[in-house]
Image (cartoon, rainbow, N blue to C red):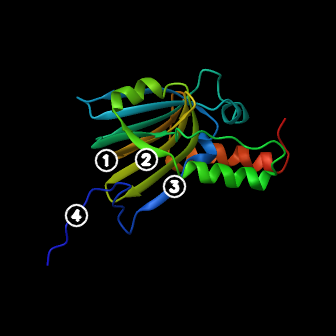
Amino acid sequence: METEERPIDWVNLPEDARTVSLWDTLHDGELTSIQSDLLARTVTLQFDVPFVREFNQLPEEAGFWLILQGVQSVRAACTKGWPGGFSVPRGASREQESKLIAEYQTKCREESQSWAEFELLATKADTLDATLVIGDGAVALRLGLMANSRYYEAHIRAKAINFAAGDRQLTLEAFVRLGDAYWEAFSQRRLP
């Protein structure tokens, strides 16, 4: 019996895929630009993460770039709030508040979004999550973003990904280290 080869994606990740969090470098940063080039089959994402940039002594104009090449799939969805309303009673404990929020979130739904519309809406989005999965000859990127008081999740599947800080090309490991170094200093209270 032949096994069907499926493309690497969040829906069907291969067993040997490696997951890499980009959270340390991109968390709390701002997605400032998304550029898709259908002819070149690329998606270029630019982020500004001032505290990571400043800690690593990068120039103010230096952004963090993710350049996906050989793009095969893009999709985006936004979370639509439940119309029944939501409030936290005055005087609620932190635990009660968290429980109420979790209950409300189970009533929300995810709605698909056109990619072109997403590109317009997600500019100036706050980055909440960024995860990369690397497989044999393919990558899948998942972003969690907050824009216009709505949560968006974006998925991009491509053949390869490149990283840069300003005009300096970086390996994946060097890109991740930029954030690791900041959060290590933060945890040890060694920030200026």
Report the residue at 26% width, 30% height from top.
38
User: Is residue 54 shown left or right of residue 145?
Assistant: right
Residue 34's quadrant in the figure? top left
Give the image location of residue 12, x and y in percent. 33, 61
Closest to the observer, 77 or 12? 77
Q: Amino acid at mark 3?
A: Val
Report the residue at 61% width, 34% height from top.
29
Report the residue at 55% width, 27% height from top.
148
Q: Amino acid at mark 1?
A: Lys
- Dot 2 crowding, Cα within 10 Å, few <14, some 14–19, many 20+: many
- Measure how far apart labels 1 and 2 are at the Cα level: 11 Å
- Dot 4 crowding, Cα within 10 Å, few <14, some 14–19, many 20+: few
Q: Which residue is mark 3?
A: 20
- Measure how far apart labels 2 and 4 are at the Cα level: 19 Å
User: Is residue 53 shown left or right of residue 110?
Assistant: right
Q: Which residue is mark 1?
A: 159
